[in-house]
Amino acid sequence: MISKKTIGFELLLVISFVILAFAIAMAVGIGEMRIPLRTVALSITNHMGLSNAEIGRIQDSVIWNLRLSRALVTALCGAGLAICGAVLQTLLRNSLAEPYVLGVSAGASTGAVAVIILGIGAGAVSLSMGAFAGAMTAFVFVAVLSNSGRGGPDRTILAGVAAAQLFNALTAYIVTTSGNAQQARDIMFWLLGSFGGVRWPEFQLLIVIIIIGLSICIWHSQALDAFTFGDDAAASMGIAVERVRIILFAVTALITATIVSMVGSIGFVGLVVPHAVRFLIGPGHIRLLPACALVGAVFMVLADIVSRSVMAQQTLPIGIVTALVGVPCFSLILYRARQAV
Amino acid sequence: MSIQAENLIWRVGRKTIVDNVSLSIKPGTVLGLLGPNGSGKSSLLRLLAGLRRPATGRITLEGRDIASISRRDLAQRVALVQQHAATEINMAVEDVVRLGRTPHRSPLAGWTQLDSHAVDTALQQVGMTDFRHVSWQSLSGGERQRVHIARALAQQPRELFLDEPTNHLDIQHQLGLLRLIARLGLTSIVALHDLNHAAMFCDYLLVLNHGKVVATGTPAEVLTPELLKQVFQVECDFAPHEDGFHILFKK
């Protein structure tokens, strides 16, 4: 679908790519050891074999082993959550839908808490794997409850709400009955999202998932466009509604579960970014999805920079920053939705 | 034969919505579906368009069971204009009509000359060419309905099903729309409420009541004072005029 847009698609991609590159370099530079942008850039080009500049070994190690992987994972999380938001808003025909409406993050939290506090599968199962298992359990729960999406958008959202309530209750139950103060604090921090501790292995897994997920979503972009006027209209235009819906729900659940299991639950990115991008380049998915991925990445890296520079010596949970930006946007959407009716 | 239905039954829960309906339609003619509210017109159209599977009975297109035809192949042949199809997304009229090309395009395929031509023709047929860059959200009800028909026409169907397309339109647009449907020359099935319009624009009529077929045939055969009293509980006279007759309802 092509029509007049506020700004061009290509322009948006170029601008966000440039900002993303700078933001990642900045994100790598800040921290307990401040590193100038130039050094960051040189270190990266050194490793790519493009230059051979002298850089201190410690600086190089901090950049390469700790901060770059973290910054890239941050970007990928933003991209993934934004893609999921765009797809879910279309499939559920609800402008307030975002990755967590499927109850996936609540499930992930329960899984993580079960590992931390109850020590289920102690040692053999890591926190991430527990979170992932929890997220997929929640997704299956929602899929069954909403009759594999056949019950329509409203039923899926209700099933997601039910799943979120159930799993949050389970999490709270486990924490209050079995946890001590320190564990509760750890979990609280994890629930609000943190990029601390992510390294190259996380990056490698995430980039594979995001690339596959984004490709599947883009492959279905015409089908997503056809959902504009609802399920029946999509079906009458030749879309296998149930199949497309279950495939795309599974993809979004997989992306969300992977992200939540690595960095905790980070809200509002999947909600705000797709709306902003749609406003800029229009609703056609073949452009919307790649653009959301890039803008989501930029948004998340910037939010991460803010979360680490607001208070000296301390990192705010990233979820607090995205919520502080996201809630006003959310309110604006709600306000506008009310006017439209 | 174009589309044909045999003994269709469709239920929601325990309630039978479409009860043993059979129909067939001659290619290139307009079949009007009449019946009181809740008589199963919309459900029947959904069954015929392949959006729901009947509990029993079957629907054939050129003798082939539509259950064995893929959604995509079916959508290249059959188009449906629904009664309520709204969106909150802000998009141009042209983009809405372009959606109609979905069954003809493969994933990731570019936009072809053929697609453009189909969209231009469809917009022209419904007289919305000048509106192509206008926002969907700013259109009136009648304009939206015409855009939906253009969207369906962009599918280049040979069978067109319309669910009360004249709802909420003023009399000028009602007549304009029905003239358009009659002029298209497609095999059309139209659910209608206005009996005089049905008599004027449809070649054949099928009357549903409580999901059952109570009458079929030409308008002159079907529309009798007895049938209208039985189905709609109204008393009326028939006034002859140049194109046939006009139904006059009594107080």
Image (cartoon, rainbow, N blue to C red):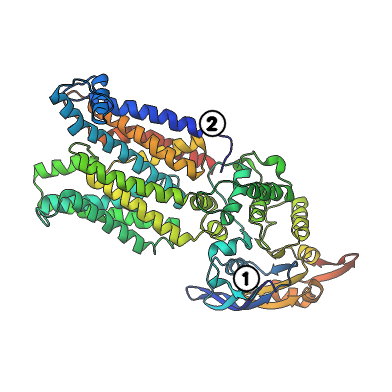
Q: Can residue A310 be seen here? A: no
The amino acid on which the numbered mark 1 sits, given as a three-letter code, is Ser
Subunit of label 2 = A
Residue flagged by tag 2: what amino acid is it? Thr
Q: For label 1, count other residues whose C-alpha is less than 10 Å away and answer few (under 14), some (14-19) or many (20+).
A: many
Residue B39 - label: 1
Which quadrant of the figure has residue B90?
top right
Q: Which of the two marks, 1 or 2, is nearer to us in this view?
A: 2
Residue B41 in picture, x, y percent from top left = 63, 68
Relative height, residue B39 to residue B118 (above, below): below
Instruction: Residue A25 in the image: state x and y as whole percent.
Output: 28, 26
Mark 2, other Cα within 10 Å: few <14 / some 14–19 / many ≥20: few
In the picture shown, does residue A92 fall above or below B222? above
- Distance Cα–Cα, label 1 vs label 2: 47 Å
Residue at image coords 18%, 21%: A55
| Residue at (45, 51) in percent of width and height | A219
Left or right of B66 in this view: A278 = left
Q: Quadrant of the N terminus of chain A?
A: top right
- The mark found on residue A6 in the picture is 2
- Give the residue at x 33% y 45%: A210
Secondary element at image label 1: loop
